[in-house]
Image: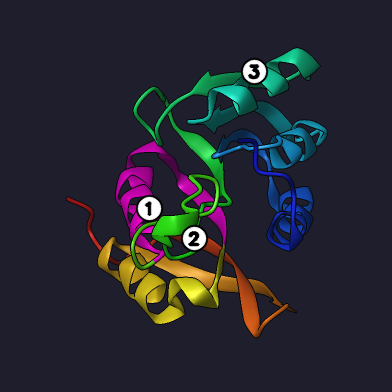
Amino acid sequence: MVYEPQEDSYLLLEQVKKLAHGRVLDMGTGSGILATAAADKDDVTEVFAVDIDEQAVNELRERKVKKIKIVRSDLFMSIGGSFDVIIFNPPYLPDEERDYDVALAGGKKGHELIEKFLHGAKDYLNKDGFILIVFSNMTGKEEVDSMIKKEGYCAELLDTKGVAFFEELYVYKIYLNPKKKMM
């Protein structure tokens, strides 16, 4: 199932329009809205749109957007090279077994996929590159903040938005901590 843009996508989209440049990776591209916005920027040279969902990959391929290379992959498994900007609108809601949806569920507590992503992303990030990510307070903001530090990153909160049912969305810019030596 292709994830159709919602409030989280549009919140992240604003930052992509402002900050994307160089070589860009849109991890979990879904509808392709973020990859397409990045590709529309003059200072973006190339965009890799990645999704595990075959339908999402096929639908984006049919659009034949200039500057976008589409790859079917489970996170970084089929990705090579490094990027100036990595965009990630992950599935971040806690699993609810009866309503499990790969486009929404980020693990039992909601943040497990983000943790796996953060662990792998540093190997694909250029020295001065950064990650743009969106997630919800339902994911566990404190847990995500802790993961960011544990993996040797620094984070800057770029935007927030309250949505229905007391949910709060956060957009972060994450970059490697220059003071922490990576192993």
Q: Quadrant of residue 58?
A: top right
Tags 2 and 1 in contact by the CB under 8 Å rule? yes
Residue 75 visible, this orientation: yes
Earlier along the polypeptide chain: callout 2 or callout 3? Answer: 3
Q: Residue at x 35, y 75 (%)?
A: 143
Mark 2: amino acid: Tyr
Give me the disc on residue 60: none
For marks 2 and 1, give the CA distance: 7 Å
Provide residue 78's location: percent of width, then percent of height.
Answer: 39, 22
Earlier along the polypeptide chain: callout 3 or callout 1? Answer: 3
Mark 1 residue crowding within 10 angstroms, few (<14) / some (14–19) / many (20+): some
Provide residue 162's location: percent of width, then percent of height.
Answer: 72, 80
Q: Quadrant of residue 134?
A: bottom right
Provide residue 68's location: percent of width, then percent of height.
Answer: 68, 22
Tags 2 and 3 in contact by the CB under 8 Å rule? no
Determine which residue is flagged by label 3. 58
Q: Where's the N terminus, which quadrant?
A: top right
Mark 3: amino acid: Asn
Determine which residue is flagged by label 2. 92
For marks 3 and 1, give the CA distance: 23 Å
Give me the disc on residue 113: 1
Q: Which residues are magenta?
A: 110-134
Looking at the image, residue 45 sits to the left or right of residue 141; the answer is right
